[in-house]
Amino acid sequence: MAHLQVQGLHKTFDGITAVNDLYFDVRRNEICAIIGPNGAGKTTTFNLLSGVLPADRGKIFFDGNEILGLPPHDIARRGMVRTFQTVSLFDSMTVLDNVKVGCHGKAGAGLFSAALRTPGLRREEKEITKKAMEALKLLGVADRAYDQAGSLPFGQQRLVDIARALASDPEMILLDEPAAGLNAHETTELASLILALKNRGLTVMIIEHDMELIMEIADSIVVLDQGMKIACGPPADIQKDPRVITAYLGDED
Amino acid sequence: MTHKRRELIQYAIFAAFIIAVPLVFRGRQSYYVSMLALSGIYAIVALGLNLLMGFAGQISLGHAAFFSIGAYTTAILSTRLGWQPIAGLLPAVAVSGFAAFVIGLPTLKLKEHYLAMATLGVGLIAYSLIKADPGGITGGVTGIVNIPPLVIGGFTFDSDRSQFYLIWAVAFLIFALSFNIIDSRIGRALMAIHKSEVSASVLGVNVFSCKLQIFVLSGMYAGLGGFLYAHCSPMYYLNPDDVCHFSLSIKLLTMVVIGGMGSMWGTLLGAVGLSILPEVLRMLGSLFPGVNTTDIEMAIYGLVLAVIMIASPRQRLKKLLGLDKPRRVEPPKDVEV
């Protein structure tokens, strides 16, 4: 069974169709890229998948369970997390505390055990710290753990953003243009990082304009244009698909 | 200096301050002790409001409502039903907390200005209900008189000094509990919500539940403050204009804002500072005959709020002192980096 099944997903904004009757599957442990020209509905699709926006109609099955209509925190706790195009770290908090927020759904300490700092809470806090540090290590930014998040350079903020999403041990991560604003070197590192995530058993969905990056790492590609899926398949097929070439190159050049 | 050590030193300074005040102001000056005792009550309420506003970023313009609910609950129980004053503690805190829950449920779905207006409305409704007294229990405009002082373990808290120590001991406890909350999963979630509700929610934070929890907690703090006020107020007397008026909500809000929202020490200083403001004004007022200083008190709160909102002196002050540099926290010893 596919890890994620999207069936007839539809979303309009004031009469303008952003996502049009979209169907696609994402297999477990693959890297699936969503590409398409600006305004194709890629980010809207992510917003619908993660519950940030309500859909007009359609079905989304994650791990076989219908998740459409669930609040974002519920979807995150089920193991699907995401990052945003614009990195928005909680910039007055430390890097480590940012990542600890990512562990929120996995922990259960309430207000009163927190106020009284019960032994159970101390244990849980220790566990959270460990998890958060592991995520930072994976992303190679553990040395910045105790710095204020807002003080990091952009590239590192992006890594912390991803670490924060990974801290809850998700099964699937949606990355919205993770290479935007990164230099060539950082992009190469990002590519190997995403492959490492796959090796750890994660399913990755990625929206990206950097075609070189996509062709290098993606197992499958979904191409959107004006909210509609115009093609999907492995990178080699997509590159040759005439509809993609018109939609893409026709628009861009 | 490690984080832990600094924290301990701060607590020690706080405790020393509490112990020192009644020793410094003696004899004819013991009036100041009762004034500072009252400021401790406001500090408790303001600490709760700071969790809500400073950390979670949710405004309340009606916190006097929860304060008065706590005060009236215990006053009614101890005067009309003859309860032991201390027995009113749990009901006072629970009823205020429950009121906050019922009010928070619909209002916390609102944002910013709308939340401000809704909480303002709640405060006004509580005020008019207590004043109109449709149930015949609040005493209407005359309020409730002859509220008994607290008796704990045979000791009666009826002197300025004993009330001061009691109130500030509670304030100290509340301060420590609040610090623990901030330094926890819930505290981090609150700060995350303050920055971006969407970012927090996709990380698994149940935004509404967190907001509601902290709203209820701040309501309970206010109820606790109200409880102490009822049994420690100078004349053992409650009336709606003292405990439920809109100006009290503004006063509490100003304490939090003046302390630089989100700073617990700042809130404490704000509470003490604003509580002694009337006294300072009176002293200044004696230089200008014919000026009624209580009239300009509200104007000063307004002015302070406006100036802070416009100039944000905390940021400027930080810059001036060179404290605006990105901070790096000392890692605790038991964590390898």
Image (cartoon, helix red, strand yellow):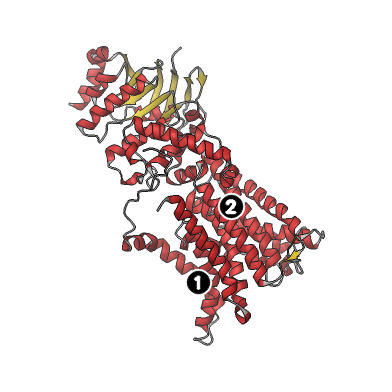
Residue at mark 1: chain: B
Quadrant for the C terminus of chain A in the image? top left
Which mark sits nearer the N-terminus, 2 or 1? 2
**Label 1's element?**
helix
Residue at mark 2: chain: B
Most foreground residue, B128 or B315:
B315
Answer above or below: position of A11 versus B118: above
Nearest-to-viewer mark from 2 and 1: 2
Q: Position of residue A235 (x, y in %)?
A: 27, 15
User: Residue shown at 66%/67% (left/top)?
Assistant: B163
Q: Which amino acid does the dot numbered 2 rest on? A: Ser
Q: Position of residue B226 (x, y in %)?
A: 66, 60
Residue A222 occupies quadrant: top left
Residue at image mark 2: B218
Q: Is residue A10 visible?
A: yes
Q: How many residues crowd around disc 2 within 10 Å: few (fewer than 14), some, or many (20 or more)? A: many
Q: Which mark is residue B299?
A: 1
Most foreground residue, B65 or B52:
B52
Q: Which mark is residue A187?
A: none
Compared across the picture, whether A123 is left or right of B150 comes to: left
Q: Which amino acid does the dot numbered 1 rest on? A: Ala
**Label 2's element?**
helix
Seen as rendered, the residue at the extreme left is A253
Compared across the picture, whether B52 is left or right of B165 comes to: left
User: Residue shown at 40%/40% (left/top)?
Assistant: A96
Q: Establish whether labels 2 and 1 are both on one chain.
A: yes
Answer above or below: position of A200 versus B2: above
**Separation of marks 2 and 1 at Cα, in angstroms:** 26 Å
